[in-house]
Amino acid sequence: MAIIRHNNKEHSVEAPAHAQLYNVLRTRCEDLSVRFGCGVGHCGACTVLVNDQAQSSCNTPLWSVDRAEIKTPKDLQNDPIGRVVLEAFLSEQAAQCGYCINGILMRLTGLFKSNANATDDQITQALMRHLCRCGAHSRIIRAAKSARSQLSSATAT
Ligand code: FES
Ligand code: FES
């Protein structure tokens, strides 16, 4: 058994210690905002925040997140930084099919939580392991930069 705080709600999860976090979130917490792609930590689709750090949930065993704070795309609009990132993606119309976007939103939210002034290079590095089959990369980067300029001007005031 493990205890996780999922989007500010505590859950006692009866599952094997090696159960993967994405599976727990989708099946026990009924959170379908966590997407599944490669299943081996290579595509970024399943990214969530664990204690404000972005990480893929398909290769995160339940035992390693006991008592951790987990945030997922489902609750992003209630996070002050996540909301800015989300709105930038909507206004730049950065998604095509949108499948990759949930993980990317979480990755960028994690990045801007640790550094609202992330450089272009740091944004590119953060997104390096996120695959987008639609090839929407240029709009994704544009949306990421737009979110950064809003967040960095907010921290400057
Ligand atoms: S599904 Fe987790 S990284 Fe691809
Ligand atoms: S928008 Fe379709 S996979 Fe990225």
Image: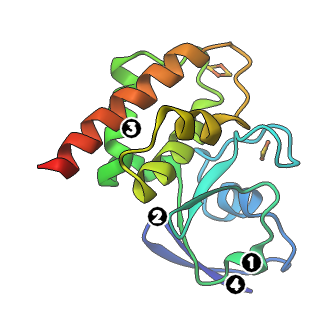
Residue at image location 42% in from the left, 52% down from the top: 75
**Badge 1 element:** helix
Q: CA distance from mark 2 to mark 3?
A: 17 Å
- Seen as rendered, the residue at the extreme left is 157
Is residue 41 placed above or below 105 in the rendered structure?
A: below
Q: What secondary structure is marked by label 4?
A: strand
Rendered location of residue 144, percent (x, y):
44, 31
Q: Position of residue 109 (x, y in %)?
A: 46, 48
Element class at badge 2: loop
Question: Residue, x 86% and y 46% (percent of image)?
Answer: 39
Tell me the residue that label 4 is attached to.
Answer: 2
The image quarter containing residue 27 is: bottom right
For label 1, the residue is: 64
**Residue at 19% across, 46% down:** 154
Answer few, some or many: residues within 10 Å of disc 4's Cα (few below 14, many 20 plus, some between 14 and 19). Answer: some
Mark 2 or 3: in front is 3
Give how far apart the Cα atoms at labels 3 and 4 are: 31 Å
Q: Amino acid at mark 4?
A: Ala
Amino acid type, label 1: Ser
Mark nearer the N terminus (2 vs 1): 2
From the top left corner, tell me how far across and down residue 25 is, in percent: 66, 60
Label 1 crowd bin: few (<14), some (14–19), many (20+), radius 10 Å: few
Is label 1 or label 4 in front? 1
Distance between the Cα atoms at labels 2 and 4? 16 Å
Residue to which mark 3 is pinned: 85
Q: Position of residue 46 (x, y in %)?
A: 69, 46
What residue does disc 2 label?
A: 7
Question: Ligand 2: which quarter?
Answer: top right
Viewed as shown, does residue 44 lie left or right of 15? Answer: left
